[in-house]
Image: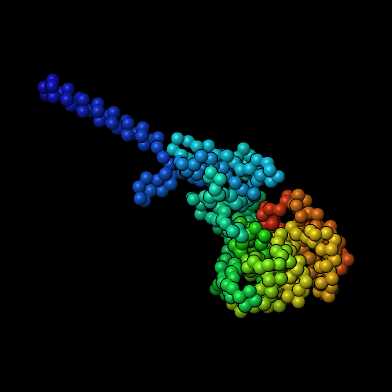
Amino acid sequence: MSAKHHAIVLALLIGASATSGFAQDTAETPTTCLPQGPFAQMDYTSVEVLADGRVTFRLCAPDAQEVRVTSTDIDPIIPAGFGGGPRGLPLTRDASGLWSGTTTLPVPADTYRFNFEVDGARVPDPLATTFSRERSGINSTFEVIGPEGAFQSYDPAIAHGVVSRVEYWSSTLDTKREAYVYTPSGYMTGSDSYPVLYLVHGAGDSADSWTSVGHANYIADNLIAAGEAERMIIVMPFGHTPAREGADMLTNTDFGDDLTRDLIPFVDSHFRTIAEADHRAMAGLSMGGAHTLRFGVTRPDLFGEVGIFSMGLGLSGPSDVADYVAANTDALQARAALSEPVYYAMGTEDFLYGTVAPTRAMFAEQGITVDYNETGGGHTWINWRRYLKGFLPRLFR
């Protein structure tokens, strides 16, 4: 090979090496976190639970100016902003437009709702695979796995039931309605009939809330598998009804009429239920607790057992209690004649804690036995899942 040819080959090799190195550097430092190409996927984890229990959140948003994680479930680890204080977990942007941030403290084992806030707009996690509806809008969810939360986690070692979404026509309200129905393991392949619990959500929630964030189905599965609860059907109705002038959310007779005249008959005719009061129960949280006070406690002919979570009487003063008693005197006497106590649970930090004393006094005056469960914590799903865990083993024994 001539000296001239040797020089040309050497130059080509050097150029190829330089080009390869440039391409490698470019690949290692992407210019954008957005997927490239028609079938490309996002290449990051949006929620990562670290080994020490802290949680890192990520969102690809190259054009955003400010991004934070918001949640009312993880306060104070992620501040909820109650009372005008700090709100959310601020995220930091890298050169590719990927925003990230990590909680300063570990997040306890449990299930949580969250969203991203992008330049003031609430945005569910685009990489999430689990979501939970509110009365309006939607949340992403994530679960931190651990022994403290195992009672409400999916366990691959046990048999699980099925959650179905049903629609029915409400002749009372002249509209289509929905409910979620849990049937225990073995229901689909068997012929047995089962007792039924009607379980109602709170004011900010929707019909799917008791499963999507409350994990009522997993709580029931785990208790049944451990022999701590009876096999039962759990019906989770939509606690809100079409708006009308003069309607009150906590004394909503439209809900009560739909429940007794439409939903219960629908369930009894479409599922294998034991259609009698001794095998039917009602419970609810917050607004659902108000529904239970109004339409469960006062209907011992329909519901043999009842549970009230994070709700009480007296929000408008003593007349609240007096009016309730005056309107339901005979029903309360009938409730007092039953042997099953009313299950009543409240957290000491709950903003409704002040309703406990007048409600318990009313029950005592009426001769109604109460099984009262006072816990720490506030008006949160962390408490409500645990109240359900305490309530289910009492039913249908």
The quarter in which the C terminus is drawn is bottom right
Q: Residue at x 68, y 53 (%)?
A: 380
Q: Please, which residue is most extreme toward the top here?
A: 3
Residue 21 placement, left or right of 303: left
The image quadrant that residue 10 belongs to is top left
Q: Please, which residue is most extreme toward the bottom here?
A: 269
The image quadrant that residue 328 belongs to is bottom right
| In the foreground, 233 or 356 | 356
Q: Is residue 234 above or below residue 57?
A: below
Q: Is residue 171 above or below residue 44?
A: below
The quarter in which the N terminus is drawn is top left
Whole-percent x and y of residue 62?
45, 41
Q: Is residue 4 above or below residue 336?
A: above
Task: Please name the colour scheme applied to the rendered image.
Answer: rainbow
Residue 154 placement, left or right of 336: left
Whole-percent x and y of residue 358?
84, 59
Q: Residue at x 83, y 59 (%)?
A: 317
Q: Residue at x 80, y 66 (%)?
A: 341
| In the foreground, 154 or 260 | 260
Whole-percent x and y of residue 66?
53, 40
| In the foreground, 311 or 66 | 66
Whole-percent x and y of residue 228?
69, 63
Q: Please, which residue is most extreme toward the left here?
A: 2
**Tally of marks:** 0
**Residue 192 in sight:** no
**Residue 313 in sight:** yes
Q: Residue at x 53, y 50 (%)?
A: 123
Q: Please, which residue is most extreme toward the front here?
A: 245
